[in-house]
Amino acid sequence: MSFALEFRKNHLSGRAAPVIAPAKRRRARSKSADRKAVNAATSISGRQVARALMIAGLILAVFNSSALVQYTHRLSDNVLGPEIIIASEKWHALMETGRMTEISHRIRTAVATARTSSWHDIGENLGLDVRQISQSGEPNSQSNNGIITSAPQRPDERGEQPLRSSIADGSS
Amino acid sequence: MLFPTLNFALFFMVVFAISWELKDREEFRKAFLLGASYFFYGYWDWRFTALLAGSSLINYAAGRFLSLTDDDRQRRILVATAVALNLSILGLFKYYGFFLDSLADVLLAMRWERDLPFMEIVLPVGISFFTFQGISYVVDVYRRDIPAADSALDIFLYISFFPQLVAGPIVRAAHFLPQLNQKPQLERSMVSLGIVLILIGLFKKMVIANYLASELVDTVFFDPSVHSSPDLLLALYGYAVQIYCDFSGYSDIAIGVAALLGYRFKWNFNQPYRAASLREFWHRWHISLSEWLRDYLYKPLGGSRHGGLKTYRNLMLTMFLGGIWHGAAWTFVMWGLIHGSVLAAERLLASIRSAPAPAVAIVGFGHGATGQLLSAGSAGQHIFSRVVRIFMTFNIVCFAWIFFRAENFAFALDYLNGLIDWNGEAQFAGPFLVVLIGASLACHFLPETMVEHVARRLEWLGPIGLGLILGFGVLLIEAVAPEGVAPFIYFQF
């Protein structure tokens, strides 16, 4: 369109140019600003989550490197399998040297102890009279149709290894 | 691909990064998410992706045809055809063997033995869930609750979206499709809620459900006849907790993963074992299924509109079909019938209680000392009555779980016999399992909005804080959880 035609259309055609009411314009502007703000917030949140996921991944790779080794062993069919396995084992050895895997070991040991604890152990820890505690789940209790005939002996009194040390050794 | 695995973690990290890179190109983003969902599903068995695509195509086509006609008769035929096709797929894969087994038993009993066309059919994972989603879309379009989707991509993604594909929640088209047409947003509240839900879900599944399964429930249910009554009772309560943690854990992770991708799903569980009636239980347990059954089965059957007897019939039918939806076995039918009859009984009792009483109505006790005493007494009575009703409801639900979990009817009856003929000593009731069950049940009485409160507290954490919580949270769960990854119970449905 030539400049003259455009000028005539805009200024001389008699049709008033659409006037947007200031309030409407403000609303439109604020809507678009809102959209931009939401977009920006989404981008920021997205980047934050991506970083958080990477940090979480790093934490797991450092403190739970044994899982990485297990995972790579399952990829042994892969073309890159052997290389990945060697790399993960090296990484795990490095983490073990730095005692990074200690946390997981300690938690696992504590859970294993809790799993095999009996009411007798709990009672002892709480300083309660072990004879009055239910025999349920107690491997070392002696019963006669539910009647406790004598105080249950501690494992070490019976010449056995205490339960906890056997778990710590990984032998139970 | 199971949620609590490194494979899924890697898959999700890639999907998350690419999907948000594509946030300004909505169609590409949807296509990418669709591809990712098919990859996720095909990871079990790629052949079943064709089934998923076929089911999506049927529902998309039905929706388009429904939008082209206003003729009621044609619309009815279309919706009936689409529903029948959906149910045929479900029936073939899920109920074919069950139907033939039952038919063979009947023929044998009548001495009309025949060679029946038995086939070994593998049940595609999540088939009940995506079939129900497809049906809900077609019926909603038929009822004009939602417009038919123009884009096939939307329907394909709605039916196959990976967080909810294999074990729900059963997302409704009216809730999800509008989200696909909006620009995806990731608010801070969604991020923190997503991370909190993923951690809670992982803990429920990997720690509570897996320990209960491996150390108690599987052993006791394997042969109930050799276990003592206290152990049977403990294993029953253990199973109630296990199935809740297993299924709600999956739903929590699904809702959390969807939130991180910018989509909102409704809650699927809300502390179900604090329900004081079975009706309330179904408002708190597998909410998406109970709403589905209500809207697409109970109400079309007539609901409670045609008086007492028909209401009870509708309740029984709905729960019977709800039972058979879970699996092709008579134990599931029994489970549904128990729920149906108790729901009907509750309704009957409520109608008797709400009948106009001849006595003078008591509107209050006044403000005096006697009035306050009576009010306090009434409040106490109310609390006591609620506690009793919660206890009864929980035990009815547990009673029904026996049939749900038992391998077959004979095992379920053995289990019941063992419970009734009370004897023996508890072998499994060690502190670890008792505390695990007790604490899990106690958590049902925490404030209902606690998860949201915790998530709100984390909203303003930066990436380092969130990363530390997620990383150490998963590390703790991984260290506490037993070895191995058991599949989710609801995958088989």
Image (spheres, grey):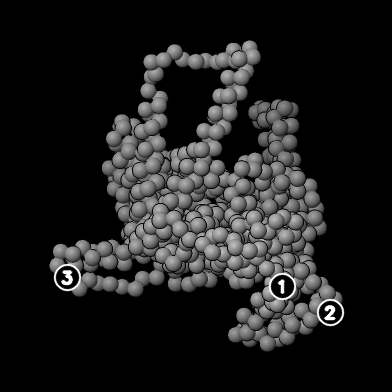
Q: Name the residue tied to disc 3.
A: B113
Label 1 chain ID: A
Q: Quadrant of the N terminus of chain B?
A: bottom right
Disc 1 vs disc 3: which is toward the camera?
Answer: 1
Please give the name of the residue rendered at 32% of the width and 54% of the height, measured from the top-left corner.
B84
Secondary structure beneath label 2: helix
Please give the name of the residue rendered at 73% of the width and 80% of the height, measured from the top-left corner.
A88
Q: CA distance from mark 2 to mark 1?
A: 38 Å
Q: Position of residue B340 (x, y in %)?
A: 37, 44
Q: CA distance from mark 1 to mark 3?
A: 67 Å
B184 on left or right of B333:
right
Residue placed furthest toward the left: B111
Numbered badge on residue B173: none
Please give the name of the residue rendered at 77% of the width and 79% of the height, measured from the top-left corner.
A92
Task: Please tell me which of labels 2 and 1 falls first in the chain.
Answer: 2
Residue flagged by tag 3: what amino acid is it? Glu
How many residues crowd mark 2 within 10 Å: few (<14), some (14–19), many (20+)?
few
Label 3 chain ID: B
Disc 2 vs disc 1: which is toward the camera?
Answer: 1
Q: Name the residue tied to disc 2.
A: A97
Q: Position of residue B16 (x, y in %)?
A: 66, 61
Secondary structure beneath label 3: loop
B104 on left or right of A125:
left
How many residues crowd mark 3 within 10 Å: few (<14), some (14–19), many (20+)?
few
Residue flagged by tag 1: what amino acid is it? Glu
Q: Quadrant of residue A56?
A: bottom right
Q: Name the residue tied to disc 1.
A: A157
